[in-house]
Amino acid sequence: MSDIKYSTPNEVAGKVALITGAASGIGKAIALLLHARGAKVIAEDINPEVQALARPGLVPLVADITQDGAAERAVALAIEQFGRLDILVNNAGIIINKLVIDMTREDWERIQAVNATAAFLHSREAVKAMLPNKSGSIVNIASYASYFAFPTIAAYTASKGALAQLTRTLALEVIGHGIRVNAVGVGDVVTNILNNVVDDGPAFLAQHGEAAPIGRAAQPEEIAEVVAFIASDRASFMVGSVVMADGGMTVTAG
């Protein structure tokens, strides 16, 4: 065994980050990890429980990210509190399990609004704030469902496919201004996203994750580690990538 000890990297020290869907799960893990590694953080969520994250250098914001003006207010808060915006993580996401034939227009549009449209709106406003600094990083939380599907998740797969393509297209538009846009394609992660679908969402995801080649679902902190790297200057040559952190789900393709 080597005696070498590796210190925790402070790859985002001095950066200012905005994370959506930060009250729980992946978003909470990202907010706490970036903050622990030296970033100033705005943690945005519709759930008032996000306020429990408040501490020096981490400011919670209760907001519905789908509403007009929400993105503008979130970015303005980052600048008001910390003087700039360097990192945006579009993490917020929801899902429903319905066959297309049983889905209402309202079902469909709610999923698109949270998973895709809100990411567009927050990205647009973040880019405006990043342009004067000629630097910045946007990380979108995509999914293996950006590429693969199974019955009852059409709205979710459509939204995550859109998010992957938004990632690639926006990356081309802004890299000339020093702003990088990438995504993480996550697999099953033990979170509460399915709590409105099954009795015990985390348990269901833990079990479903056993089908991945790795044999388990991820913990939110494992995804946060990937996001921290991609958001940082250590990933300076990554542009328009969708990095799969899915335990091998997309390798097997079903």
Image (spheres, rainbow, N blue to C red):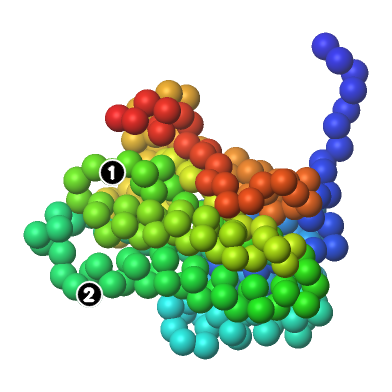
Q: Is residue 60 among what the camera can see? A: no
Q: Position of residue 110 (x, y in %)?
A: 31, 72
Q: Is residue 208 toward the left or the right of residue 9 in the image?
A: left
The residue closer to the viewer here, 122 or 171, is 171
The residue closer to the viewer here, 71 or 196, is 71
- The residue that disc 2 covers is 106
| Disc 1 element | loop
Q: Hey, which residue is sitting farthest bottom in the picture?
A: 69
In the image, residue 172 sits, relative to residue 151, either above or below, namely: below
- The residue that disc 1 covers is 149
The residue closer to the viewer here, 237 or 160, is 237
What is the three-letter code of the residue carrying label 1?
Ala
Q: Position of residue 123 (x, y in %)?
A: 57, 71
Nearer to us of marks 2 and 1 is 1
Q: Position of residue 15 (x, y in %)?
A: 79, 63
Q: Is residue 175 toward the left or the right of residue 194 in the image?
A: right
The residue closer to the viewer here, 139 or 13, is 139
